[in-house]
Image (cartoon, coloured by chain):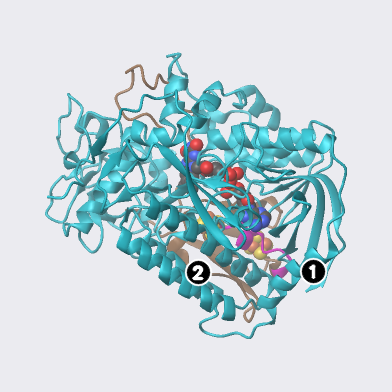
Chain colours: A cyan, B brown
Amino acid sequence: MEWKETIRTDVLIIGAGLAGLKAAERAKRYGLDVVIVDKSTGRTNLSSVAGGAIGILAGAWQISNPSTLRSLTERGILGGAWEIKYCKDQRMEEITAMEEVPLQDELAEFGCINPRNMKTYGPNIRMNWAATGPLYHYVQKVGCKLMKFFTVTDLLKVDGQVVGVVGFESRRGHFMAINAKAVVLATGGAGNCWARNNTPFRSTGDGHAIAYRNGVLLHMMEYESFDAWIIAEKGVPNYWIPPSYGRTMGNVLNAKGEDFLPNYIELGPKATLKPGDPFHIKYGAPVIDNVAKIGRAMAMEVYEGRGDDGAILVDFSNVPDEAWYSEPKGIAFLHLMRDFDWKKKPVHMYPGALGSYGGCKITEEGETNLPGLFSGGEVAYGEDLKYTNVFGTRAGRAAAEYAMNASLVEPDPIQIKEKKDYLEKFLARPKSTDGDPKAIRDAVRDLSMEKFGVLKSEEGLIEGIGRLGELRKVASEKMYASDPRELRMAFEVESMFDCQDMHARAALIRTETRGVHNRLDYPYMDNDLWVKEIRIRKVGDEMKLFTAPIRRGYVEIPKGRFPIKGMEKK
Amino acid sequence: MLDQEIKIVIDHKRCIGARCLNCVDSCPREVLDWDKEQKKVVVVNFQECILCFACEEACREDGNNCYKIEGAIRKEFQPAPRIDMWGGAREVEPPISV
Ligand SMILES: Cc1cc2nc3c(=O)[nH]c(=O)nc-3n(C[C@H](O)[C@H](O)[C@H](O)COP(=O)(O)OP(=O)(O)OC[C@H]3O[C@@H](n4cnc5c(N)ncnc54)[C@H](O)[C@@H]3O)c2cc1C
Ligand code: SF4
Ligand code: SF4
């Protein structure tokens, strides 16, 4: 592959998801040169397929209760239980301020006239693309340059300061360096590192890996959220059933036909436990407060031998057609199920990866510990559109302010050559069965599901880390790329190795169960030991993990150990 | 169960192929690929298709409009009613998603 001349800009943004677009839009307001690069089109990302719950904040639904915004924010998408909320509590204060919520007017400015009318999964428009699409066009209209199909593979640094990136264009096939005064990392999440997931295939945690390799401080890597309603049927996508009215009316059962959820979740005082009642009436508690627990419950049932074919069953036979046809997300279910007759057969389901809570440790302004590097979105704080929106914007602002006072520092040509050689290596290797990037990717994803899935244990994590190392060794010797497109995949696989290694090692240290982190060997939440976060940083060639106290003051955290319902040893 | 079969239909005569590949590159789930031998856009993994319509939209936006997903339900929705989500006015789960 040939080498193209280095281009120069003030602010470089990696990733054209919501975080990157918001950052670009904000940085452009300073009158700077802004370049956005994306390894794909910028439309195959989390922000485009998301459910679009940001619509609520955009005024899509009337919020009559003043505390609702706060309550919504608290609940986040974490499921609301304070045990999980805790892991986000240090950013709560910032989020509740919500200074950067795109109000309806702001969205309108980008061309999104009626966010209330997002045609989720409708004929014309994809879910949250209704909100990111207009922004995608808007940033280009105001002069941000979008370079599609440019995969960033590494940062360029001079004296510890980030001065640009290297990467390659995967359509025409050339290498290139980009020299910038400030760089924003907005590469999204790592959900596709797990075999079962409902994320786009490009969500491979590239940014997490790039950050790690360059000595950025990361945190909370042990938290990967799993959505419970991921279909496990042949011929049907292993994708989630979008949250719809119909979904909440399905009866979740184990192989014996028992409703097992009451063994795992706290029932509300008015729980009817009547099959066919919508979830929040049946259990007297809203789904959103129980997302993590439902996933845990499903996995526990299967683990303890009450599953059917490695999954649990959801019976939709009593759900009337209108429930599906009345809303876009219900129609999405009909589309996903194809000719599977759920009226006759219950649907197999098992949780799958959705989003990554962990990532770059950033300041409230979106700065990382590397001068010149900023970050926002799922690669940094949180895994939902609200955080992405707030911290994407802030990262853009901080990068612009930094760039205003900085001058361009020429990158080191030797460094560029080294990084190019690293990529050339894959292209130079011969094709082989064990070096096929797709096959290695599948192996990593299967291993992750098996050993780093919903339920974890010391034994499984250690074995998994070992097997991941073996796979990595093979990849480091044999993984090839026969064209630039395949090179992108090979690079993604390399990212997955780092991401999953961080995930597993952090999960191994956290000897308790909390929120989406479930340890079979520690079936309790340990507030005496674990009201802290795990941080990761590469020092020399070694991965260093250490703990740090979390900032308190938002939620009350009682002392003691608390058994997890349904997980205690019987 | 849908009455009709859902399928991806490409008018290969009008498709400009390798010069474009917008549909292939817009797919979040690697459902489509460019077959170098056949010189055609092919559906390689329909099982993973989540019916997000990104491919169809990409082809239409670029003016080629030779790509259709047949059999899908195409229904326009009215704007969601302004509802009070937590005040108890609505019986069902609030339409909030993850
Ligand atoms: C199915 C689903 C439903 C969801 N629903 C909701 C919801 O209803 N409400 C909510 O708040 N949140 C929801 N989320 C979460 C939310 O979508 C994400 O947290 C958010 O969109 C992340 O935005 P981002 O900009 O950080 O990442 P992304 O949108 O994924 O953007 C990252 C971009 O970076 C690019 N990139 C990655 N690596 C590289 C590289 N090496 N070089 C160049 N470019 C690169 C990618 O191509 C991508 O375009 C949902 C997520 C999923 C998967
Ligand atoms: S987007 Fe349309 S014209 Fe382009 S390759 Fe796909 S089918 Fe052909
Ligand atoms: S509808 Fe979406 S998932 Fe299916 S082929 Fe098109 S882009 Fe891919």
Residue under pointer 1: A417
Of all chains, the one bearing label 1 is A
Judge depth for marks 2 and 1 and give the one in front: 1
Is A99 in front, or is A51? A99
Residue B55 in view (yes/no): no
State yes or no: residue A431 in magenta. Answer: no
Q: Secondary structure at mark 2?
A: helix
Q: Pointers 2 and 1 in contact (CB under 8 A)?
A: no
Q: Could you tell me if residue A518 is visible in this image?
A: yes
| Residue A268 at x, y percent in the picture | 20, 27
Magenta span: predominant SS is helix
Q: Identify the residue position indicated by label 2 in the image.
A: A441
Q: Which residues fall within the magenta stretch?
A: B18-27
Q: Is residue A24 left or right of residue A9?
A: left
- Residue A478 lies, in percent from the top left, at 57, 81
What is the distance, in whole Å, between disc 2 and disc 1 at their CAs?
27 Å
Of the pair A504 and A100, the residue shown nearer to us: A504
Q: Residue at 47% of width from left, 19% of height from top? A: A62
Q: Nearer the viewer, residue A157 or B50?
A: A157
Image spot of residue A409 (x, y percent) = 86, 50
Tell me the element at label 1. Answer: helix
**Quarter of the figure with the N terminus of chain A:** bottom right
Disc 2 residue type (three-letter): Arg
The answer to whether A214 appears left or right of B86 in the picture is right
Q: Can you say whether A484 is above or below A357 in the image? A: below
